[in-house]
Amino acid sequence: MAGNGGPPFDLQITHEGLDSLVRAIRQEADGKQLRKELAANMRTALRPAAAEAKSAIMAMGSTGAGTGPGLRAGVAKKIRPEVKLGGRWTGARVKAFKTPALRHFPNAPKRLNRRNGGWRALTWGHEPWRTQTGKPGWFDDAFTNDAAAHRAAVHTAMEDMARRLAARAR
């Protein structure tokens, strides 16, 4: 995009492109507000992907006769789009955060997604131990069909901000 009348930086569809966009935003007088807007727009672009992941975990079968908090609903509440603009990691992703208050099972999102293994648990708090499995690949498979659309939505948010900065530079 750099060149004739374009923005004063090179925007590519990579994390380097996002880094250069963030550097250009920092040079603006209201850079902090622009960064907040860019992050909000990128999170908005990823909300449909998070909804698909939540739907995938809620579709997992249940033998549930338990009285504790719902495992599927607890994991679904912890799925959110995350955007970081600077620091050690820069980018946008959908993340399933840990669930420490959910049945003392903080790694539930990761263990439910495992393709092999699962996790071991006691039967009603007593011996014998049993191996439980979740819905292997529920998180990963939720993004396979629409990954390109979600990536394009994030890139559109980046390009909109780049155009806005280019219009200011003119």
Image (tube, rainbow, N blue to C red):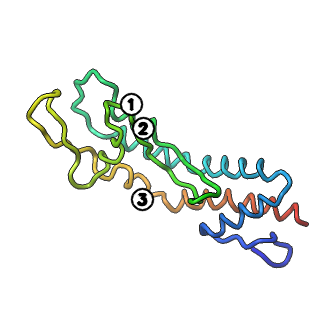
* Mark 1 or mark 2, earlier in chain: 2
Horizontal relation, residue 133 to residue 30: left or right: left
Q: Nearer the viewer, mark 3 or mark 1?
A: 1
Give x and y (percent) for residue 94. Answer: 50, 50
Image quadrant of residue 72? top left
- Amino acid carrying label 3: it is Thr
Quadrant the N terminus occupies: bottom right
- Which of the pair 29/17 is nearer the observer? 29
Q: What is the secondary structure assignment of the residue under circle 1?
A: loop
Give x and y (percent) for residue 46. Answer: 56, 50
- Binning the other alpha carbons within 10 Å of mark 1 as few (below 14), some (14 to 19) or many (20 upward) gives few
Q: Residue at x 34, y 29 (%)?
A: 70
Residue 76, numbered circle: 2
Residue at mark 3 to residue at mark 1: CA–CA distance: 30 Å
Horizontal relation, residue 9 to residue 15: left or right: right
Give x and y (percent) for residue 107. Answer: 34, 43
Q: What is the secondary structure assignment of the residue under circle 3?
A: loop
- Which of the pair 39/139 is nearer the observer? 39
Q: Residue at x 79, y 53 (%)?
A: 31
Q: Residue at x 57, y 55 (%)?
A: 92
Q: What is the secondary structure assignment of the residue under circle 2?
A: helix
- Amino acid carrying label 1: it is Ala
Disc 3 designates what residue?
Answer: 144
**Circles 1 and 2: CB atoms closer than 8 Å:** no
Residue at mark 3 to residue at mark 2: CA–CA distance: 18 Å
Disc 1 designates what residue?
Answer: 101
Q: Residue at x 30, y 24 (%)?
A: 68
